[in-house]
Image (tube, rainbow, N blue to C red):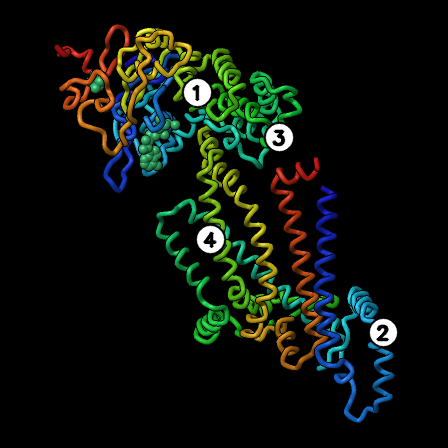
Amino acid sequence: MSDALLSVRDLVVEFPTRKGILTAVDRVSFDISRGEVLGVVGESGAGKSMTGSAIIGLIEPPGHIAGGTISIAGQRIDNLPYEAMRRVRGKRIGMVFQDPLTSLNPIYTIAEQLIETIRTHMDLNERQARDRAIGLLDQVGIPAASRRIDDYPHQFSGGMRQRVVIALALCVEPELIIADEPTTALDVSVQSQIIDVLKRMCADHGTAIMLITHDMGVIAEAADRVVVMYAGRVAEIGAVRDVIKDAKHPYTKGLMGAIPTLMQDSDRLTQIPGTMPRLTDIPPGCAFSKRCPEAFDRCFVEQPDCRPYQGRDVACLLYDEGKPQ
Amino acid sequence: MLAFIIRRLVQSVVVMLVVSLIAFVMFRFIGDPVDQMVGLETTVQERELLRQQLGLNDPLPLQFWHFVSKAAQGDLGISYQFKRPVADLIGSRLPATLELSFVSALFALLMGIPMGVYTALNRESLLSKLFLTISLIGISLPTFLIGILLIFVFSVYLQWLPSFGRGKVVDIGWWSTGFLTVSGLKALILPSITLGLFQMTLIMRLVRSEMMEVLRTDFIKFARARGLTNRAVNFGHALKNTMIPVITITGLQMGAIIAFAIITETVFQWPGMGLLFLQAVQNVDIPIMAAYLLLIALLFVIINLIVDLLYVMVDPRIRIEGAEA
Ligand SMILES: Nc1ncnc2c1ncn2[C@@H]1O[C@H](COP(=O)(O)OP(=O)(O)O)[C@@H](O)[C@H]1O
Ligand code: SF4
Ligand SMILES: [Mg+2]
């Protein structure tokens, strides 16, 4: 048993569809340590959100976890009964969604939503919960928090609302926050502010972050380690610095080409031609084989495992024992 | 907020004036009021005198003004059939119709909302399917047929409930109520179900579809991710958000219930305004028809006002923008 805060092992998420079973997450494994920021990156449809939903136990039926384990501090949570899992949500694992405009209930004040959440998990009276809520709004940078707390969501701007959402996700100090594209819906000018708030809040409370994004730039700026996902599978996991400097997986190399500030390095300017396969018809062998500039014969028949290689994990046959000639 | 109410009040007055104009035109131009009041042997001079007395020779706008101001004071003319003031006739019939409509609406709401919520939350359950089937019947069978079926089963076959009339009523001032006697309450059951069944199925289907819509929203997902209890999510967050359309439709349906009471009152020989109106139509009793028209319009306007106010109470977006405007 690892001493990681969150431990995901061989997670499989499936959707029964008319065309057969769709595997949205395929044997994904990774750990998150306490206080760490783990980025999860990959193009749209790669299974990032589904991994996050699986961890917090909110996959929409008919989707379901079909294999693997998820543990927090050594305790399995993927097989908990509904009520036990509900107490984990918010209390031990918080979540921030993409769109702050739709994340808040329009008919309740910010105070009502914060106090309800706090009192669901903590034994506080109305007054104490309200004080705590005001303190949190203050910390996430809402000016005049004690007055604005009684406003409704529509009275805040998008950036301010995402601060409120962060306060809500953190209001009972969970050990882990899953932030699913927390800045994608926001104005570019406030994106890095929100990432800063998120990072600062989590650092203050010792909260680990699973930062889901399709933007390698955000990862470079905010994450300690990164999981690169492709077609529901892990392609590469490593320290952000290592991965940016020296990506191993050909798909990761392609992703790096998409960060403008890193484009001086002409070696890795490769843009990846083609699109990710639909999850119902992933080719046999490596899922990336049809687009991979370095593919060789084994790639079309053998599915690479995710193996340790030079201080990281890579799922590519290039780094297997039987390399190409 | 105040401006909003005043604007609505002005609109209501305009609506009432337009309806009054229609009623006035009916009153004044369908048949000759004098013909209806005098015998065949009346001389031309006597007729002319009566015309003068009734103000029928005044300019039309003046006549309209007199009509409106008298109506506003409750003077709606004399019934041709009964030779009694229309206001008295309506006053003696109004409680029967309003009590029937009120109980029908209550039945529709108290059955429709829980059934809608249940079917939205338990989509696959057998009971949901049963409810949906019943609602299909409620929507497709005509009112009079439902009434006759109910009479057949509960009055003729089982002999549990009366098939006609109001039972024993108690007079409180000019208001005669059926709420205070057992026979009065029993007499209300079948007509209320008959009148309310359509509205009940409508409300059930509305609540169901709105609820399913709201349950898919991000703020519900976020509420779950914060670990709120199922009860808080389903009722506190989801149901409350469906109330805005439900209030609107219910309000409009309340008007429809009162108007549709005509059919139910006929089937159950219910001594209400609908029955009075039907008799008036058969006997071309214009003053009663005009008064009925005015009264129904007035009820619609009052209900709409109440709906608007409820709306403002439920939805902070309207409330606050209204206040700032
Ligand atoms: N309700 C659903 N039914 C079937 N497949 C779904 C459903 N929701 C998501 N998926 C599949 O899961 C895959 C992963 O989705 P998601 O995790 O949202 O991707 P990402 O967040 O990386 O963009 C998608 O490619 C999609 O095909
Ligand atoms: S396994 Fe083969 S196809 Fe897949 S990424 Fe490595 S080289 Fe490319
Ligand atoms: Mg996503």
Q: Which residue is the site of mark 2? A: B58
The residue at which mark 1 appears reads as: A177
In the foreground, B114 or B67: B67
Residue B259 position in % (x across, y down): 60, 66
The answer for how far apart the CA atoms under marks 2 and 1 are is 81 Å
B82 sits left or right of A129 in the view: right
Question: Which amino acid lies under the numbered mark 4 shown in the image of this protein?
Answer: Arg
Q: Nearer the viewer, residue B64 or B196?
A: B64
Q: Is mark 1 within 8 Å of ligand 3?
A: no
The answer to which of A297 and B74 lies nearer the viewer is A297
SS label for mark 4: helix
Q: Which residue is mark 3?
A: A155
Label 3 neighbour load within 10 Å: few <14, some 14-19, many 20+:
some
Circle 1 crowding by C-alpha within 10 Å: few under 14, some 14–19, many from 20 = many
Of tags 3 and 1, the one toward the viewer is 3
Q: Earlier in the sequence, mark 3 or mark 1?
A: 3
In this view, B182 is above or below A123: below
Instruction: Name the outermost residue toward the bottom.
Output: B41
What is the chain identity of the residue bearing mark 3? A
Q: Earlier in the sequence, mark 2 or mark 4?
A: 2
Q: Position of residue A131 (x, y in %)?
A: 61, 21
